[in-house]
Amino acid sequence: MGEVKLLGTWPSPYLYRVIWALKLKGIPYEYIEQDLYNKSPLLLQSNPVHKKIPVLIHGGNPIAESVIILQYIEDKWPQNPLLPSDPYEKAVARFWVKFADEKGLSISKVFRSSGEEQEKALKESLEMLEIIEEHAPGLGQKKFFGGDKIGMVDLTLGLLAHWMGVIEEVTGVKIKEAGKFPRLEAWIKNFKEDPVIKENLPELKDMLPAMKRRRETVLASK
Amino acid sequence: MADDLILLNLWSSPFGMRVRIALAEKGLDYELIEEDLSNKSPLLLKMNPVRKQIPVLIHKGRPICESLIIVQYIDEVWRHKSPLLPSDPYARAKSRFWADYVDKNIYAIGKLVWGATGEIQEAAKKELIEWFKVLEGEVGDKPYFGGDSFGIVDVALIPFYSWFYAVETCGNFSIVAECPKLVSWAKRCMERESVSKSLPDQYKMYCFLLELKTKFQAQ
């Protein structure tokens, strides 16, 4: 079937979405760490349009954009499905994947900015959490957004489960007040306790200094 | 209704046009409800409480939102006719990539070309031409983005054709001069009845967008 290579930068949550999908489906892959300040020929060749990570290369064929990679993995390896088989349920899941992917950018923006720009991103992040808490189907009733098993919506929201806390610590900004989002918090607990996820989370003690440095670099370049 | 389909739409919305094209490609009957976005109907707010936007497809009473998600849904439920996505996973990934590229960049930038003025407009115009050239490179001499078959990338992009006159007039440039292959592709799409019947006349769109522009500038 061809070997699988994964280009990424540690500890990107977008990279981890793909790692989790591959692990959940039991697909072996070779991980190749990238330097985004000195982009490799392989990265530029595999993602000439966006020049970003993650990129999955399967049998020489490159696929870019994390959500598109997740859909490719789902199409190619149907075991342990990440999407429902019913077209309507699938469409609902895709809606929330898109919502999570787009709105999650606000949380990334809180990390990458300061002052007024950060305040705006914070407000947007809060709106996102409120909408998920109120409207996301299954939240509070089922273990995961995907039901009893982890699905694509859960993977796309992984940012909330593990990265948000680190972002809050690095920026000194509180995004999610404890106790205000009980259903979301229950989901975060379930997500992080899943055996595959638990074994494939970047270590917090390593993330903190790495993300501190990243934030300094990003702010300095503005 | 035979197929039990309702589409909440706005005639001028390129995203609504995508859905109409997909429904027409599949030969489906549906009830078209024109929404007034300044006075959103209870039905719209009930069916899309998160985004409160059109288009929304309601099939057997259940809503599907987000134009490209709706198109994929239509393609999956009525897969026996005019498939809009290839069956090979890698080809599907490529289609999704380009549809996503169009979704993230083209309409937002296009809006600034007809809607903004001065430096913002100039910068938007440059970016739009750049991205059009990338798309032109991708379609090349193929009949459609996916090759011989009309597909989701074409559906995602072709509604922008209804903005051509507005964008060219406001931005003061010629799309055919900058991207002739893209214009050939657009005209080829327009030969399909599903497309020509779903897109409004370019001049009617231009007048409508000018009105919008004046309204925004007045605020």
Image (cartoon, coloured by chain):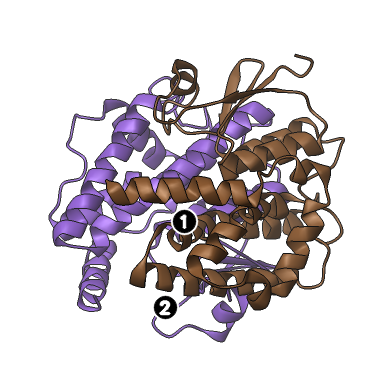
Chain colours: A purple, B brown
Image quarter of residue B167: bottom right
Residue sitting nearer the eye, B116 or A212: B116
What residue appears at the point 17 percent right and 62 percent down from the top-left corner? A114
Point out the image quarter for the N terminus of chain A: bottom right
Up the image or down, A221 lies above or below A131; here it is below
Query: Horizontal and vertical percent for residue B204?
Result: 60, 46
Point out the image quarter for the C terminus of chain A: bottom left
Could you tell whether A203 is left or right of B80 in the image? Answer: left
Q: CA distance from mark 2 to mark 1?
A: 31 Å
Query: Horizontal and vertical percent for residue B117?
Result: 37, 65
Q: Are marks 2 and 1 on the same chain?
A: no
Query: Horizontal and vertical percent for residue A186?
Result: 32, 29
Could you tell whether B155 is left or right of B11 in the image? Answer: right
- What is the number of the mark on residue B142? none
Pointer 1 residue: B111
Mark 1 neighbour density, 10 Å: few (under 14) some (14–19) many (20 or more): some
Q: Amino acid at mark 2?
A: Leu
Q: How many marks?
A: 2
- What is the number of the mark on residue A36? 2
What residue appears at the point 48 percent right and 70 percent down from the top-left corner? B125
Up the image or down, A91 lies above or below B206; here it is above
Mark 2 neighbour density, 10 Å: few (under 14) some (14–19) many (20 or more): few
Query: Horizontal and vertical percent for residue B103?
Result: 55, 53
